[in-house]
Amino acid sequence: MSRVKRGVTAHAKHKKVYKAAKGFYGRRKNTIRAAKPAVEKAAQYAFRDRKRRKRTFRALWIQRLNAAVRPFGLTYSRFIDGLAKSGITVDRKVLSDLAIREPAAFQAIAEKAKAALAA
């Protein structure tokens, strides 16, 4: 039985790691011993941060909304309470976008929320 030379397989595996390590600094991009653990760690961070991104963006939208409703004499929590009482079901992402791009529309929503709190 003839022996199997594994050079082709090893080269292909290394190539995959190097491709993933492209852009890394120093030996981490071009030495398999340094690149492999660096790529594995990067994958762990990527997995974790895909989950974390959702939290981060929600926090950003909330901060933007809080800043946007302050001129109308509201806080974020009172604004959300007013929206619930007035029956407006618009998510935070859209509200945040409205506050930035369509200030007039956002003002109308804020006024409705404020009116619902007073009633």
Image: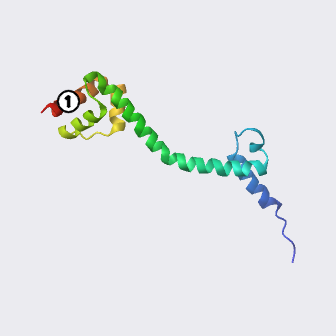
> Label 1 is placed on what type of residue?
Lys
Percent position (x, y) of residue 98?
33, 30
The extreme right residue here reads 2
Q: Is residue 10 above or below residue 80?
A: below
Q: Is residue 60 above or below residue 101?
A: below
Percent position (x, y) of residue 38?
69, 48
The extreme left residue here reads 119
Q: In this view, does 43 lie to the left or right of 96?
A: right
Way the structure is coloured: rainbow
Percent position (x, y) of residue 60?
42, 34
Residue drawn at (55%, 50%) of the image: 47
Q: Is residue 33 above or below residue 26?
A: below
Residue drawn at (36%, 32%) of the image: 96
Which quadrant: the N terminus? bottom right
What element does badge 1 sit on?
Answer: helix
Residue drawn at (32%, 34%) of the image: 95
Query: Which residue matches tag 1?
Result: 114
Count of marks overlaid on the render: 1
- Rate crowding at label 1 as few (under 14), some (14 to 19) or many (20 or more) other CA atoms within 10 Å: many
Please identify the quarter of the rendering in which residue 67 is found: top left
In front of the other: 87 or 56: 56
Which quadrant: the C terminus? top left
Percent position (x, y) of residue 102?
32, 25
